[in-house]
Amino acid sequence: MKKFIDNLSNENNFSIYSSFFRIFICIHLLKKILFTWQHKGLLFMDKSFYVSEKVGLISFFNIDTNFIHSNFQIFYFLYLLLIILFFFGIGKNFTAILLFIFYEFLQNLCPIILNGGDNLLKFILLYMIFINSYDYLAIKTKKTKNNELLLFNNFISNIGGYAICIHLCFVYFFSAIHKVHSELWFNGIATYYTLSLERFRGTPINLELAKNYLFVNLSTYGTILIELFYPCLIWFKRTKYIMIFLAIVLHSSIYIFMMIYDFQMVFIFVQGFFISNSTYRKIFYNLKNNQVIRKIQNRFKVKF
């Protein structure tokens, strides 16, 4: 146990990617604000078609949902401000706590518009509270001089990072179990019905693919196999990158062919948590010393 704790305390294993992912989260949330802004009255304000209930943190803090509906403009402004502060790393973990609370409130106001990506992102925001994602891409990087406090921060940050990885594995595993017990998935024809629906007709070739028996079977059973074996194979060095590649292909295909966007972007970007800091450092080092990159730097006077 001591060796396990020491390994988690020596270094923040997620310092590089968590900093990048923090930026992605903020851009993703800003995009959702942009897309829902013109419908905010219908979704979240007094004239909302959905009667929200006291659940989650709203119930915990005993907040009157009508109060949020009536003052939603102020609520939205504060929510936007928190996203911007989190983007620049201002307030650090305290800002992360407030952003999680506000995101939870927003989800509870109109939960019927949420998707799987929103549900995963809520838990990711919870885990991000404990992760030190401010060593990079922040206005003021987080530096701790006290060695014991640094070790503790590394330990908590790594616990939060691995929590994201484990949570993702559970999502894939239970999704696979659900599919196995579904008649359409078990018989290998689920993607036929999905590609045939006009709602999910993302490309002109969807109908042609739906008529291809081999493609339908491979895509249906392939999805189950990826989700079923991902939680096991993702932890081994030899198979990790294969599973990350297959997961990205899976979610990119859903993004392109089925027009399910937000859901897939969250699942694609969260894959980066399985790649170590040392790998990212090697990638950055190779980019920095690449001749093409150097020519761009010299031409435009840009430093990486």
Image (tube, rainbow, N blue to C red):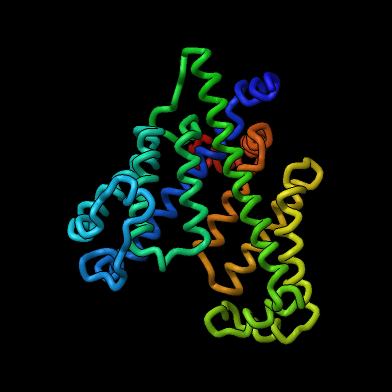
Q: What residue is drawn where x is 57% and y is 81%?
A: 201
Q: Quadrant of the N terminus?
A: top right
- Residue 294 visible here: no
Q: Answer left or right for 253 relative to 35.
A: right
* Residue 69 screen position, x and y as percent: 22, 60
* Residue 65 screen position, x and y as percent: 25, 57
Quarter of the image for residue 290 reads: top right
Would you place residue 216 above or below residue 304 in this image?
Answer: below
Would you place residue 280 above or below residue 192 in this image?
Answer: above
Q: Nearer the viewer, residue 133 or 57?
A: 57
Would you place residue 80 above or below residue 249 in this image?
Answer: above
- Residue 22 visible here: yes
Q: Nearer the viewer, residue 284 or 57?
A: 57
Q: Answer left or right for 197 relative to 183.
A: left
* Residue 81 screen position, x and y as percent: 29, 45
Q: What residue is drawn where x is 23% and y is 54%?
A: 64
Would you place residue 56 above or below residue 200 in this image?
Answer: above
Q: How many marks?
A: 0
